[in-house]
Amino acid sequence: MFRNYLFLLIIFSLSDTVAAATPTRRAAPAPATQPAPAGDAAGNDMYAWCNAVTLAIPQIKLKPCMTADLKPVAVKSVRGRHIMLREFKPAQPPAARVLVIGGIHGDELTSASIVFRWLEILQQPDNAASVYHWRVIPVMNPDGLLARPPTRVNARGVDLNRNFPTYNWLKEAPRYWETKTRRDPRRYPGRSPASEPESRWLHDEIVRFRPDVIVSIHAPYGVLDFDGPPTGVEAPLRFGRLHLNRVGVYPGSLGNFGGLKEGIPVVTLELPHALKMPTEAELTHVWNDMQRWLRVNLIERRMAQPAAPAVPAAPVDTAALPEDAVSAP
């Protein structure tokens, strides 16, 4: 019995020695995640928004998004996401007001990417575009962009670019959807005009801001479109490789609402690809051509127009007024 006890004691001792000599195997560390910057709630909201957008659009980097100084508007998307806006206002009276809208269709990723590139240009000091008052919305449809996969429509399945209150919308928009698109769910105009928080806010913003021109970016048809009043502004013939090709007017579209109903020129850039950005040289070409068109139509043409003659006020017949009205200050 003593021998058995001695044998077990030796076995246990050897086991402890082997265990001590064997290195402990540790679990692999979890992938590092970049923490949100410390600060107020607005800063954390901005980080979360930029982080989500840059994950959805690889061409956009986190730092340029964070330094774009975007501010949330008063209205959120259907799913409670921020719609971000950046305003550039010159110190002197602006030559004109320009509203830029990207990403109204969530699956047209380049339509948001190019606006972020323009934001970088507009932030540069003493750029020629600083004479205008800009309001820039890089992602008008955040729910569509951040869906998996991204969708043209918003979270309620409405095409925001068919939801604006154009003339005779209640009759024309549903009929066009049913007969022309054969009830294509990607082009569903909604149950009523401006039924969506995103399109309703943009409608109100246009009414408030009263831009002299609206620039809207889409993809992937590779053309330049124009909707607007017949006088006052000439349609652009080309921006870079995008040539003017008027694709038509649709019930509920932004071009229809802004250009025809409100009398505001709407320039629509249809980039060639929804996923692949144009080259840097082409982006520069597009930007320069757009600035040239803005200068000619919003500054030079206005300066060339003769000032309207002052209309003298009609004389007031004081004899017909009550005595106290004539002597009142």
Image (cartoon, rainbow, N blue to C red):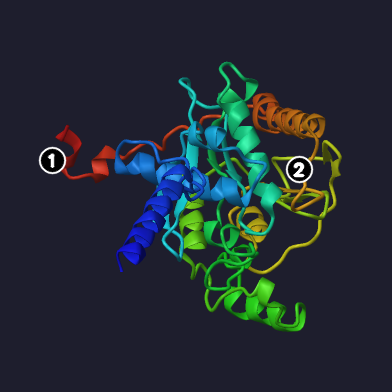
**Is the C-beta separation of discs 1 and 2 under 8 Å?**
no
Q: CA distance from mark 1 to mark 2?
A: 71 Å
- Out of 267 and 82, give the one closest to the viewer: 82
- For residue 8, side relative to residue 147 (left or right): left
| Rendering quarter of residue 280 | top right
Q: Measured from the top left, where is residue 164 in percent x and y?
A: 57, 64
Quarter of the image that includes the N terminus: bottom left
Could you tell me which secondary element the residue under label 1 belongs to? helix
Q: How many marks?
A: 2
Q: Residue at x 31, y 36 (%)?
A: 39
- Of the numbered discs 1 and 2, the one sitting upstream in the chain is 2
Quarter of the image that includes the C terminus: top left
- Residue highlighted by disc 1: 324
Residue 229, numbered circle: none
Q: Measured from the top left, where is residue 80 in percent x and y?
A: 41, 61
Q: Residue furthest top?
A: 126
Q: Residue at x 71, y 83 (%)?
A: 178
